[in-house]
Amino acid sequence: MTSFGPIPAASEPLASPTGFDCAAKPSGFATFSTHRIQTAPGINLFVREAGEGEALILLHGWPQHGLMWHKVAPALAKHFRVIVPDLRGAGNSSIPADGYDKVTMAADIAAVMDALEIRTANVAGYDLGAGVAYALAAGHRDRVARLAVMEFGLAGFGYESFMVPTPEWNNGSNWHLGLFTVPDVAIMAFQGRERELLSWFFWHIAHDGEAVSPEHFEAYLRAIQRPGALRAGIMYYANVWQDAADNARLAAVPLDIPVLGIGGAMSGGPYIEQLFRPVATHVTGAVIPEAGHWLGDENPEALAKVLSDFFGTGPSAAATDHR
């Protein structure tokens, strides 16, 4: 694992890659510099960065963290200045007791942009990170140029339809969404059983049942076994009612930037595009073949191409407009 230096104050220069042991970094991130950035009192985010050009921020889902972009981020860094934060409560970032509504988490990302002197960025959010990405785009409208959202529906605009268990073994059979709205019970159920929980997550709606490598599985396991991390991840879900209220307020003025909804062929598919049409006026869609829910691990090459095309380094044919 990367060895970190002292946490810089918000006014101090950010750490450079000098002094970091690149050999200790996860495969794929060897050329990325790493920073810790204070985003609020007592809160700092671990951030990876590489590349030049327009800024592109990649936001992970749960139970993953920035590691999920280990193949996609290096490919995109050939064309963009790629920023990969670990959201609060995940990976190597701070694990506070609260602040897991997506508006607060989006404010963290705006603070990262300020610290890195990025005025406007392209943003891609996956799973629950898509909720953060939307809150950033809708709540900080001059900061996001284009938005890609993956494998997610916003609270108040379709998310609730996935909260009821179903007999089908598909993207609608997500019993945990309801259970995790009662965090004390969910923690009681899974504290000490994190391995079993992750085994279900990474097998469920995977294209071939082997979504992540054993090495990365263990990395995700270590991350959610840290004190407070399991609770933090559950709180990503438990804030659904606050997120729904916030999204209703934000969506009163639909986004007018280009938005791309991306789904895995065996998971959200073209439905992701439909879920975001009520909150944005320029929505297109793309489907990642040979992929279930875990896009960055199951078909990273196709995902990187779709994102690269959408954000401006190639033709936009990968995004099909069904309007």
Image (tube, helix red, strand yellow):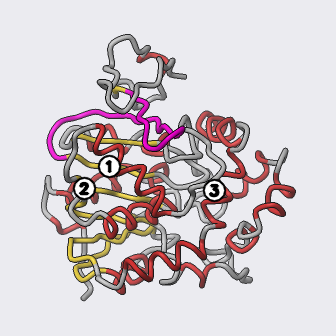
* Foreground residue among 286 and 77: 77
Quarter of the figure that contains the C terminus: bottom left
Give me the residue at 66% from left, 49% from top: 97
- Where is 71 relative to 311, above or below? above
Q: Quadrant of residue 163?
A: bottom right
**In the drawing, what numbered circle is on residue 122?**
2
Q: Earlier in the sequence, mark 2 or mark 1?
A: 1
Q: Quadrant of residue 318?
A: bottom left
Secondary structure beneath label 1: strand
Q: Residues within 10 Å of mark 1 (few under 14, many from 20)?
A: many
Q: Earlier in the sequence, mark 2 or mark 3?
A: 2
Give me the residue at 62% from left, 35% from top: 219
Q: Earlier in the sequence, mark 1 or mark 3?
A: 1
* Foreground residue among 147 and 31: 147
Q: Residues within 10 Å of mark 3 (few under 14, many from 20)?
A: few
Secondary structure beneath label 2: strand
Secondary structure beneath label 3: loop
Per the model, the C-alpha gap separating discs 2 and 1 is 6 Å
Secondary structure, magenta segment, majority class: strand
Residue 40 belongs to the span the image colors magenta: yes
Region in magenta = 34-54
**On the image, numbered disc 1 is attached to which residue?**
57
The kind of residue on which mark 3 rests is: Gly
Per the model, the C-alpha gap separating discs 1 and 3 is 29 Å
Check contact, mark 2 vs mark 1: CB within 8 A: yes
Per the model, the C-alpha gap separating discs 2 and 3 is 32 Å
For discs 1 and 3, the disc positioned in front in the rendered view? 1
Spot occupied by residue 255 in the image (x, y as percentages of width and height):
27, 76
The kind of residue on which mark 1 rests is: Ile
**On the image, numbered disc 3 is attached to which residue?**
209
Residue 235 belongs to the span the image colors magenta: no
